[in-house]
Amino acid sequence: MSLTSRILIAMVAGLVVGIGLHYFMGAVEAGLASFIQVYITDGLFDVVGKVFIASLKVLVVPMVFVSLVCGSSGLGSDNARMGAIAGKSLGLYMLTTGLAITLALSAAIIIQPGANIELSTTSEFIAKEPPSLKQVLIDIFPSNPVQAMAEGNMLQIIVFALLFGLSISRAGEQGQRIREFFDQLNEVIMSMVNILMQIAPYGVFCLLAALFAEIGLDILGSLAHYFFTLVGVLLIHAIAVYGSLVTFLARLNPLQFFSKMRPVQLFAFSTASSNATLPVTLNVVEKRIGVDNSVASFTLPLGATINMDGTAIMQGVATAFIAQAYGIDIGVAGYLTVVATATLASIGTAGVPGVGLIMLAMVLQQVNLPVEGIALIIGVDRLLDMLRTAINVTGDAAVTCVVARSEKQFDMDIFDTPVAQLTERTE
Ligand code: ASP
């Protein structure tokens, strides 16, 4: 059975077991319910789920660093090519994020998911100030590479790895030896990712079972309108925007692209973290889709940090929803501020679970909407976080394919070969 099918089955099983346990615990006597909670949902499932996430995360920093050093040293001193890759990916990331928020705001204004909402909740959400553009720019440059790695600061790691890789390519024979070492290290790390992918079904099962045992499905009730508007926009964005990018700009078969991306989306859905999914994204995009390391090692870590279309869509729909629920009209200027703040906030924040809510607090503050409006949607946010993370990683991969194709750093043979025949090479 393919890895994708195994993860998919584990996901469905986790969902069913989790939801089943949620209602079972509600129906049986308190003693039994708390036994199940302590030893099974908060016990076994939580432990296995957390260990799985930790094993993914542990690979992120070494993998991004080593892979990007390989990529940038491979480009040699071809500064023009480096500039082209950076320019195209940044441009496309901004473009897709802009499209995402615009689509989200338009849908939310037309559908009005927040009309007829009763405002009875309050919360203690305190918004942080959005970072200024000046600070965002300064923070990209590391003063201490070890600290950047310890903190998992992706943009700083990218800058350091680029510099390191470029210097290797300028250091002649010694540089060549170091480069070979990094190439080999890169293969070792890829093979660690493969080991991890094999145990993924167990991790995914436990993560979902623990989560759904806790939240159940009741929460959906009053927020169904908001939930389904958001899910609809996420799907439209994935199909229309990414489908078009892949078909028209990258000139690839979109069905093949989406089918090869499935394991990445399942990982993103289960972990709700673009960052933790990065090792799998890099592995799949290079080894199964066919993008060369010189492009993927730069565009994917960058995308996991600054390109969050799913999150931007949530900001758009949620802002409009909260404005409607409170009966406040923020006007066109208000909506433009939403676009600008959401984009800026997404550059400075990492792709980790729940970060979208923190960004939303900043956005609401900027347009003078009550931040406590977040309490309205917080109940379904965990579920939506999983969905929008799957969209975020798909966006990173779609842009990566466009850039790779335009730079002729793409292997059509790999792309055309079905996963089953590639598995020998990758698993
Ligand atoms: N969890 C999302 C990600 O990692 C970010 C968010 O929307 O909260 O991409």
Image (cartoon, grey):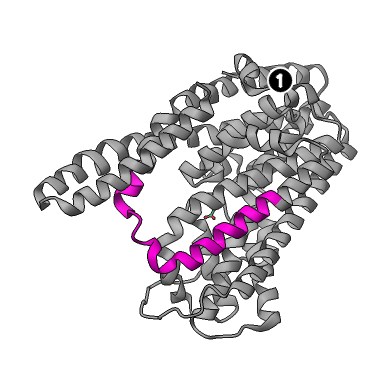
What residue is rendered at 43% in x and 55% in y? 382
Residue at point 58% right, 44% down?
148
Query: Residue 355, percent across and down?
Result: 51, 57
Give SS at disc 1.
helix
- Dominant SS type (magenta): helix
User: Which image quadrant for residue 65?
Assistant: top right
Would residue 211 appear left or right of 30 to someone viewing this image? right
Q: Is residue 214 magenta?
A: yes
Q: Is residue 361 visible?
A: yes
As drawn, 352 above or below 73: below
Q: Is residue 159 above or below residue 119?
A: above
Q: Is residue 276 visible?
A: no
Q: Position of residue 161 (x, y in %)?
A: 69, 36
- Name the kind of residue labelled 1 in the image: Ile
Nearest the viewer among 329 and 52 is: 329
Q: Residue at x 83, y 35 (%)?
A: 405
Mark 1 surroundings within 10 Å by alpha-carbon count, few (fewer than 14), some (14 through 19), many (20 or more):
some
Q: Quadrant of the C terminus?
A: top right
Residue 174 vertical placement versus 160 (above, below) = above
- Residue 130 x/y as whole percent: 59, 68
Viewer-closest of 317 and 78: 317
Residue 247 location, quadrant = top right
Task: Give the residue pinned by disc 1.
Answer: 178
Work out whether residue 14 or residue 311 is closer to the camera in this orientation and state it. 14
Give the x, y percent position of residue 36: 19, 42
**Residue 204 is a magenta residue:** no
The vertical placement of 236 against 198, above or below, is below
The stretch of residues the image draws in magenta is 210-239
Mark 1 Cβ inside 8 Å of ligand 1:
no
